[in-house]
Image (cartoon, helix red, strand yellow):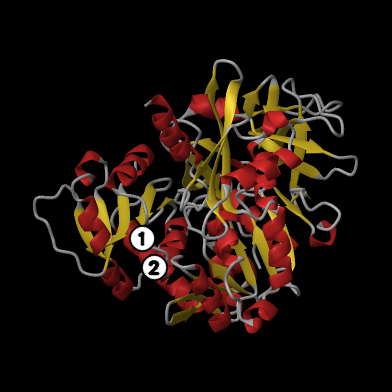
Amino acid sequence: MPARTNLHHLLSQAAATTPDAAALTYRNATISYKETWQRSNAAAAQLVGVGLQRGDRVAIYLEKRLETVAAIFAISAAGGVFVPINHVLKAAQVRHILGDSGAGVLITSADRLSQLRSVLPETVVEHVIVIGDAVTDPASDWQLHRWDDGQAAAGEPSPAQTIDIDPAAILYTSGSTGKPKGVVLSHRNLIVGAESVSSYLKNTSNDVILSVLPLSFDAGLSQVTTAFAVGAHCVLMNYLLPREVAKLCVQHGVTGLTCVPPLWLQLAEVAWPAAAARRLRYWANTGGRMPRATLDRLRGIFAEADPYLMYGLTEAFRSTYLDPAEIDRHPDSIGKAIPNAEVLVLRPDGAPCDPGEEGELVHRGALVALGYWNDPTRTAERYRPVYHPGQEWRAPERAVWSGDRVVADEEGFLFFVGRRDDMIKTSGYRVSPSEIEEAAHSTGLVRDAVAMGIDDPALGQRIVLMATPAAAELDVGALTAELKRVLPLYMVPSRIDVRDELPCSPNGKYDRSSLLSELMWHVSR
């Protein structure tokens, strides 16, 4: 097969080699690789027909469905850059992403378009391609096109002129401050990421991968790209209830499942049918540290499956994983670099840290993203050179400085310490929120736990723990006593807030910014 240089080659090559194999399932519909490629080709021709040029941005504001995936690969085939927008976002958030990305084309559904009519005039969107029927608004500033019309025309665009280093996608990710920022991924980033992840997960065309995470999230998008890289079957799901995950695993014979910690905490409480647990070949965690108690419980439920503990950042798509063979020796490790990547632990001056010395995780290689969309200042802060002693002839190489604090042991296994910008400084100590959260989970009294620091004139910061009960009620006194037993006094929270639920971001991670804002509001009253 020819080299895969553009994202859509993952699909076109699978369609050429295994045209009749199942590619996608959504609800009761399953389509083959051949049909998926035909739909993408027709949509690409429609995009070219409305004037899409190389590098133009196309936003996709849809729930996860067959058309969403077809649109992603269509935009690549047409030479554009796709901007996936999480379907749970509201109009104001969508307006920010549309405006910031400069998307001139929007692919959405009729009901979602009705939610955006008041904000679209504030963007540069000129063309809206609608899934389903939409009422034409003659006063609108954009042209409406029906997705079905493009499918009926079944055209085929001229080959895209993009190369592998060109932008392919902009993924918007929340930062510690300000509005979401767009991380620009190249075709190379996405293809190498798919090939790397599918290799260590040992994916084959026999796999059935359940896509639970949003496609606007790098780990969620990876479920589709890794499946297509090997011709596997991808089942699309818009997550609603934990028991529905188990139900779909039974229905489709799912062999691979990747989730974030808040979702795994819920899935660990589900009564998993033996058939689903037995069929699962691997399960993977990303987006945060897995509490030890949850890890042990899941290993008991999926006794025959390989557990993969992974770490990634949108700025480098994927970064590390822990080999399942090492999980008993290093259950708290985020592992080592994924294939075709190098992960370094560096001091602020760029010198390598010694084993056991805390430093910043720095990722180099083909997965390093192109930067932040239209933000050269922030790009320069995060994407900085690394130098190679003895190779002074080399041009400076840009790596991504993650902002995450890690430690490597003598064998090179990495251990997450905390974010550079969410470390708690109290009583002269630097405290990792994850260490407190792990201690809280180990008591068995809490389901969710988020630790954060708030300003205190005497301590610098004092520690507050927000938690949800594992049972009907949470005994704060008992939890505090247990934390005092396992933590040094300076790490014991001065306050524990009990909640029924903790808010999560659209990507399923705990929404620390929202929790901190809410906490500061209560403190200021």
Name the residue rendered at 76%, 47% in the picture: 337
Residue 54 position, x and y percent, is 42, 48
Query: Which of 465 and 485 lies nearest the eye of the viewer?
Result: 485
Quadrant where the N terminus is found in the figure? bottom right
Tag 1 or tag 2, which sits nearer the N-term?
A: 1
Mark 2 and mark 1 residues within 8 Å of each other at the beta carbon = yes
Question: On screen, 414 above or below 193?
Answer: above
Query: Which of 389 and 478 lies nearest the eye of the viewer?
Result: 478
In the image, taking residue 126 as reference, residue 453 lies left or right, namely right
Q: Residue furthest left?
A: 138
Quadrant where the C terminus is found in the figure? top left
Question: Mark 2 highlights which residue?
Answer: 67
Residue 70 position, x and y percent, is 43, 66
In the image, taking residue 197 as reference, residue 107 lies left or right, namely left
Query: Which of 318 and 43 lies nearest the eye of the viewer?
Result: 318
Question: Mark 1 highlights which residue?
Answer: 62
Answer yes or no: is residue 174 visible: yes
Q: Amino acid at mark 2?
A: Glu
Q: Amino acid at mark 1?
A: Leu
Question: On screen, 217 above or below 521?
Answer: below
Q: Residue furthest front?
A: 477
Q: Secondary structure at mark 2?
A: helix
Question: On screen, 68 above or below 125?
Answer: below
Q: CA distance from mark 2 to mark 1?
A: 9 Å
Name the residue rendered at 54%, 20% in the picture: 456
For residue 272, what is the image quadrant? bottom right
Answer yes or no: is residue 33 visible: no
Q: Residue furthest top?
A: 457
Residue 165 position, x and y percent, is 58, 45
For residue 197, what is the image quadrant? bottom right
